[in-house]
Image (cartoon, helix red, strand yellow):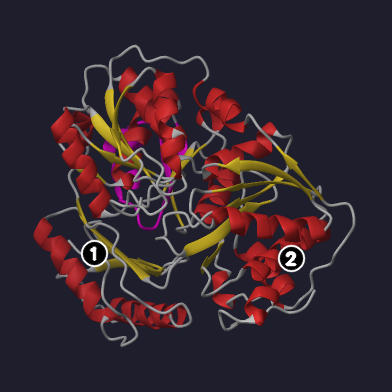
Amino acid sequence: MTKPLSTVTPNTWDFLREPMIKPTGFREYDARWKYPEEINLPGMTALGLGLGTQMIKRGVDPVIAVGNDYRDYSLAIKNALILGLVQAGITVKDIGPCITPMAYFSSFHLGGCAVAMVTASHNPNGWTGVKMGFEMPLTHGPDEMAELRDIVLNGEGVERDGGKVERVDGVFEAYLDDLVGDFKMSRKLKVVCATGNGTAAAFGPAVFERLGVEIVPSHNELDYTFPHYNPNPEAMEMLHDMADTVKESGADFALGFDGDGDRCGVVDDEGEEIFADKVGVIMARDLIKLYPGSTFVADVKSTGLFASDPELIAGGAVADYWKTGHSHMKRRVHELGALAGFEKSGHYFLSGDIGRGYDDGMRVAVEICKLMDRNPDKSMSDLRKDLPVTYSTPTMSPYAADEEKYDILARIVEKLAAKADAGETFAGRAVKEVVTVNGARVILDNGSWGLVRASSNTPNLVVVCESSDSEAELRAIFKELDDVIRTEPGVGEYDQTF
């Protein structure tokens, strides 16, 4: 295997023949590139050869399930990846177009094989990538990604005989059985199913139909141009559209899924967007009654209510705050034997009796419907209003180049820690602690907080703030945090504010 080049000029013979891979595409827990600017098809074949070589090196059974999301170039990307895997001597089970959690499920369905899912997740068109893992429900984390990067970029892929491709049908039917079983709603529900024309459009409606839920469709036609908006239930554009549909239809609530179906967003019957971490608290409150003393993992972007909510405390819940990122969270849930993990981005990791431990937007949809069935006298807005009041921002992402963002973040963290060490106030309050497990979460003496970290998937920083006191304090926390962020000239504009 030759070493891939970091750049190749498009519209040349070399672009068609030589593998080109931008090194920054190997991220903390999956691989993502702009296509074809940062990776070409020979580069994706080199990635497949490297992934297959990594499987052999680690003693993994040389069988892998491979699927792809619904983008116009994803099939070509998948076929190039498969070619490299076959060159490495791997048996590829091609499960066809699917959502990411369906690819994860296929490992269980097919006897425990490795998984590679070709998807750009919620990134806009023009992006591609691979989510992969050798032992479900776990997926590649920083160590595995670093090893894979070195194998690929150093040209250490080894070709072996014996590779082949098999087409596998029937995975969705088995996945649907696993999700729903013979459960049927005893309560009538009318739910907006919002998919933003992404891959979940092919699967979400069937899940609701199996549950016996009335569906209000919202952009459920597959269209890889994403004519309305990029399917991302963390973005206010999609949430506002879901809210409008709820109000027009009189639905009980809306559930929205991202481009590869592993995340779920919620809008209640009053058209209020409930950020995913608050939905996690609602679910945890319900689950703690069924499973007292359970551990719940929350990412550092999430609300402080997992630790402070009186109902969770009364049920003996244990809260663990951990690194943002689907691979980090899956591993933490697995290591602690937690019942569930919740990420503010809308990744939920339901385990034990309620899931298989990986992030699955469809599983969350099923569990939310079951939750509503167990609470027949409550609306979604009732459950929202039952929570202690906090004030929080959406997830906001100012630009920072991939090559610079971690150095920028390190300097910001140092400045924030220095302010706390000097005894300076933050938004007019004393700083209780600065948690640096993933960026910096500045926690004030009343439990309010502000977070800055680096995005693992895009050239951005990530900023989230929450106040337990007021909207005014929330804005003060954001301003104080942003003032420090703005000392770095490499930080650009936010994608959205509040």
Q: Position of residue 115 (x, y in %)?
A: 66, 48
Residue at figure coordinates x 35%, y 52% from the top left: 226
Residue 438 seen from this side:
yes
Any magenta on residue 308? yes
Any magenta on residue 318? yes
Residue 182 against residue 17 in the figure, above or below = above
Residue 344 against residue 202 in the figure, above or below = below
Residue lying farthest to the left in this orientation:
472
Dot 1: element: loop
Alpha-carbon span between mark 2 and mark 1: 37 Å
Name the residue beneath numbered marker 2.
Answer: 50
Residue at figure coordinates x 34%, y 75% from the top left: 399
In the image, the segment drawn in magenta is 293-319
> Which amino acid type is shown beneath numbered disc 1?
Gln
* Residue 358, disc: none
Name the residue beneath numbered marker 1.
Answer: 496
Label 2 vs 1, first from the N-terminus:
2
Dot 2: element: helix
Q: Is residue 312 left or right of residue 160?
A: left
Q: Quadrant of the N terminus?
A: bottom right
Residue at figure coordinates x 48%, y 81% from the top left: 403
Find residue 199 and report its image quarter: top left
Find residue 386 and report its image quarter: top left
